[in-house]
Image (tube, rainbow, N blue to C red):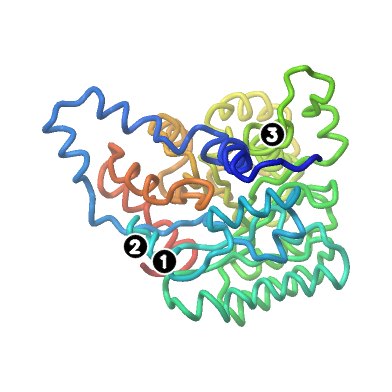
Amino acid sequence: MKPIAKPQKNLVMGRRNFLSGAAALGVGAGLSAPAIISRASAQEISEIALRDQDLPFIGVEETFSTPDLMALNSINQDHIDFLTEIGLADLGRARVDLMDQAGLNIAILSAHTPAVQNVPGQEGIDFAYRLNKGLVDGPMAAHPGRFQAFATLPLQSPQAAADELERAVREDGFLGVLTNGHIGKKFLDHPDFEPVLARAEALNVPIYLHPGYPADEVFQIYYDTTRSEYKEEYQDYIFSGSGYGWHQEVLTQCVRMIIYGVFDRFPKLQIIVGHMGEGLPFYYERIVNDLGGSTENSLKKPLGQYFQDNFWFTTSAFFQDDLLHLLLKYISVDRLMFATDYPFADMKEGTDWFRAVDLPREAKEKIAFRNAEKLFGIKV
């Protein structure tokens, strides 16, 4: 891919294209609360602005990287420069100050996609260990109580990944693991990953299914627009990722895990899905109704019941009232948690949006922090 000639152009392109979850998705502007305000009286605007200012927050999807990890996974130097500029590798005072301004009490950190899950052998094992220990010895030690974390695992080596998950949970207090899309063209329902699933269930910690970019063959079939005259730099990258593709892939992985019996084999396993369900609210009735009949003789429970028993959902980067209420139409409020997707979405914008959401206080407390406290065994 050719480099971008001018740094200023890189910044503009980056904000339009690299900012997965904000600029690329158009969600950072708050597509619902301002609409409510535009129709409200001055008194109502004041009441909305002051609503639930004392609400604590736990952010369940808050991303970080390191120079080594960015070098491993970035497209080019311009991409690295952009990720650095938005603060992806900053886990010090600057991020804590932003958390204070937003009212985010705890950030649960996870490594930037695809982390090290595509690095094979001992190199991947060592890389994952360094990332995990770096969090414990660095920001978690420097800012006690402000940061928690999901483990990064060397998923190309499933048994070693299971062992690192157990070490990270038992020794360093990690809250679970975050994965990023397919792993070497396989999803988590593949038998290769049963050691990881079994260990997560035994440890009673969840797996967060974060998106990842598609395999090369999928990219070529679905997202390559090389021969189109309407072609801009990074267009296909965003099309296959934050702009569309990876949300579909996560939902596909969720359905696969259900219909291929993962939760019948591991009934206590818990899965977290971000971005307001990755399209599930829109497709929920179609999935449950159409697939429910075809799986009623193979699964131990009705298909829809697995979404209620084995899945949790977060608000990450989708600060929209209509999507929130649609998700709550199908999923219990006891299964939804707050997240911002920082730095790919604005932290304070997320907390301000949720404070203004029209829900009962009890429901807002559950989403903002109480459900996370319950799932992870932590306290704000």
Q: Residues within 10 Å of mark 2 (few under 14, many from 20)?
A: some
Label 1, secondary structure: give it.
helix
Nearest to the observer: residue 324 or residue 19? 19
Could you give the CA–CA distance between mark 2 and mark 3, rounded to whole angstroms?
Answer: 33 Å
Nearest to the observer: residue 330 or residue 364? 364
Three-letter code, disc 2: Asp
Three-letter code, disc 1: Val
Q: Mark 2–mark 1 contact, CB under 8 Å?
A: yes
Give the residue at mark 2. 100
Q: Residue at x 64, y 50 (%)?
A: 209
Could you give the CA–CA distance between mark 2 and mark 1, rounded to whole angstroms?
Answer: 6 Å
Give the residue at mark 3. 245
Above or below, 24 against 39 in this view is below
Above or below, 86 against 353 in this view is below
Give the residue at mark 1. 96
Nearest to the observer: residue 371 or residue 80? 80
Give residue 167's quadrant in the image. Answer: bottom right
